[in-house]
Amino acid sequence: MGIRTFSKKELLKNVAAKGDKLKGVILNAEAISYIDSSAAQMLVRVIEELHDRGLQFYISGATGPTRDTIFSSGIIDVLLKQYLFVQTKEAVDYFDNLTPLSVLSSQVAHQNRRDRN
């Protein structure tokens, strides 16, 4: 499944419905197998818009080509590496407690294909 199924309009509708109670959004990317360039641009705009609203954005579960695209497309530049997680539980723990990543999780989440070569 690609990220095209992700709906910016639907996400922002849900964000608005939560109001001031919402402090952050986690995108579980486990089922995302690719992100094309238009989806990457859309995701950058969503992250920037959420940041403008004072909300943090996290991505968890991105592997292989999806993680590589996060690094190569500029998504990581607006997301920042510390908000890319291997597992959703780690993202929630980090948000709730600002718990640092384990050394292994940090290496896996922050490693793109170029780093592995």
Image: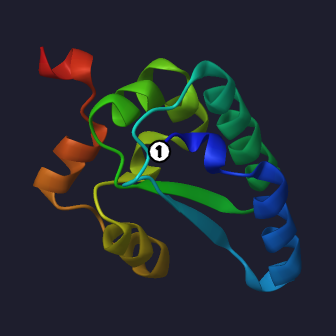
Is 38 in front, or is 2?
2
Where is residue 49? Give x, y as percent. 81, 47
Q: Is residue 29 above or below residue 114?
A: below
Q: Is residue 115 above or below residue 87?
A: above
Q: Name which residue lies at 76% across and 86% down.
A: 21
Where is residue 98? Give x, y as percent. 41, 72
Total marks placed: 1
For the residue marked with disc 1, what is the amino acid? Met
Q: Which residue is mark 1?
A: 1
Is 73 positioned to the left or the right of 109 in the image? right
Is 68 positioned to the left or the right of 5 in the image? left
Is 14 in front, or is 3?
3
Q: Name the secondary structure under disc 1.
A: loop
Is 57 positioned to the left or the right of 51 in the image? left
Q: Is residue 64 above or below residue 106?
A: above
Where is residue 102? Give x, y as percent. 17, 61
